[in-house]
Image (tube, grey):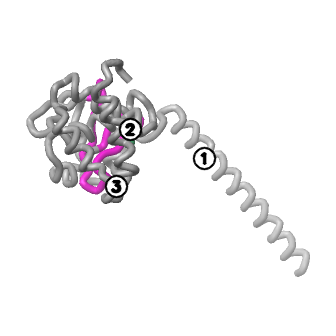
């Protein structure tokens, strides 16, 4: 009896070990898959959150102005916990929050997320990309930039507003700097 119990315990351990290896193999292949695509596709993201809409590149308008970020589509997700976000290969906007801000601020948010697509994760660089783009495309005036500064003022507390006054100072410099950052 004692021996039989021991045998079944050993067998169970063996089964458990096999299961663990199977799980490890699965996570390794998942990691490989995500390394190749570096994150979800817009379709996977939209399916995961539910109720999100994918807008193909060239079809997005913000207050009647065309908003383009290379070939990248934009996912409209009312459940996003911020105004906008950048995933590898696509942008995400929260229309519910975006509707609360002025046109230059909307276009600045979109361009800031677009800046992450082309310039990487640095916030200051994405800010500079956005204001220089606004100046070139004509949708950002010095007054509009002040609206953006007001929007990212430190009084408000999400990722878009992190250290607002410092970011503003740096954006004002970028706005007047003719060399492209
Ligand atoms: Zn950012």
Q: Residue furthest right?
A: 3
84 displayed left or right of 7: left
Q: Quadrant of ligand 1?
A: top left
Upstream in sequence: badge 1 or badge 3: 1
Of badges 1 and 3, the one in the foreground is 3
Residues packed near mark 3 inside 10 Å, few (<14), some (14 to 19) or many (20 plus): some
- The kind of secondary structure element at disc 3 is loop
Q: Where residue 136 appears, x then y in whole percent?
A: 22, 22
Of badges 1 and 2, the one in the foreground is 2
Marks 1 and 2: CB-CB under 8 Å? Answer: no
Q: Which residues are magenta?
A: 69-92
The residue to which callout 1 is attached is 26
Residues packed near mark 2 inside 10 Å, few (<14), some (14 to 19) or many (20 plus): some
**Disc 3/disc 2 C-alpha distance (Å):** 33 Å
The residue to which callout 3 is attached is 154
- The kind of secondary structure element at disc 2 is loop
Q: Residue furthest left?
A: 64
The residue to which callout 2 is attached is 41
């Amino acid at each position: 009896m004692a021996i039989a119990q021991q045998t079944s315990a050993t067998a169970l351990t063996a089964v458990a070990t096999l299961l663990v290896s199977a799980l490890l193999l699965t996570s390794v292949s998942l990691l490989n898959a995500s390394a190749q695509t570096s994150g979800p596709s817009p379709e996977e993201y939209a399916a995961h959150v539910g109720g999100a809409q994918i807008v193909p590149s060239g079809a997005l308008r913000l207050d009647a102005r065309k908003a383009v970020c290379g070939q990248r589509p934009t996912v409209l997700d009312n459940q996003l916990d911020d105004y906008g976000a950048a995933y590898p290969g696509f942008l995400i906007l929260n229309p519910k929050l975006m509707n609360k801000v002025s046109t230059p601020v909307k276009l600045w948010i979109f361009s800031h997320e677009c800046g992450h697509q082309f310039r990487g994760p640095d916030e200051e660089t994405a800010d500079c990309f956005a204001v220089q783009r606004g100046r070139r495309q004509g949708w950002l005036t010095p007054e509009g930039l002040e609206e953006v500064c007001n929007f990212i003022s430190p009084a408000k507390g999400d990722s878009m507003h992190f250290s607002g006054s410092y970011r503003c100072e740096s954006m004002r410099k970028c706005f007047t700097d003719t060399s492209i950052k």
